[in-house]
Image: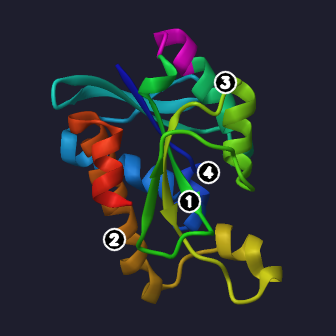
Amino acid sequence: MYLIVGLGNPEEDYGNTRHNMGFNVINKIAEQCDIEVSQKKFKGLYGIGTIYGEKVILLKPQTYMNLSGQSIRECKDFYKINLDKLIVIYDDIDINPGLIKIRKKGSAGTHNGMKSVVQEIGSTEFSRVRVGIGKPANKEDLMEHVIGYIPEEEKEILDEGTSKAKEAVIEIIKNGIDTAMNKFN
């Protein structure tokens, strides 16, 4: 069983922000694979379904980004998910919009949501799909860039990134992470 987590903030207030790329990917996977992500538990919203014969849990933590790890740990522990079956999807300022990067493991970097995940589960040994959002021209505008609303002219390119990430997650489940990395990185 795979646990596929998209990081973000509650969609009522933050649905149209760069920080919610993880949620956007989960929404796309849910739509394509006909999985309803509406059950409330584990401090999040989740749904269970099947992708290419593999049982999956799609999870959107509702703790706000900086506490995302709490939700993931609760779900992971409840379903006894092995770390090699955990995939975390999140936004990355160091990747250009429209692009993604897949990694088998690694540090949390500067991403506060990932810092929470690593702290709560006590490991960096899990897969991640990073969705590029790019950096603002002025570093002082970083917070506004990440949690501010996305201008119309940028939505299409960010949508390309979340679509690639959706395909990458499905590829990981279907053919393994090495194949997905070769195909999408």
In the rendered image, which residue does mark 1 sit on?
91
In the rendered image, which residue does mark 2 sit on?
160
- Residue 63 vs residue 31: left or right? right
Secondary structure at badge 3 equals helix
Kindly report the distance in space between the C-alpha atoms of the residues bearing marks 2 and 4. 21 Å
* Residue 65, placed above or below residue 57: below
In the rendered image, which residue does mark 4 sit on?
9
Residue 118 image-quadrant placement: top right
Kindly report the distance in space between the C-alpha atoms of the residues bearing marks 3 and 2. 30 Å
Q: Which residues are magenta?
A: 75-81
Question: For the residue marked with disc 3, what is the amino acid?
Answer: Ile
Q: Residue at x 54, y 71 (%)?
A: 133
Kindly report the distance in space between the C-alpha atoms of the residues bearing marks 3 and 1. 20 Å
Q: Colour scheme in the image?
A: rainbow
Kindly report the distance in space between the C-alpha atoms of the residues bearing marks 1 and 2. 13 Å
In the rendered image, which residue does mark 3 sit on?
121
Q: Which tag, 1 or 2, sits closer to the chain's start?
A: 1
Q: Residue at x 48, y 33 (%)?
A: 45
Question: For the residue marked with disc 1, what is the amino acid?
Answer: Asp
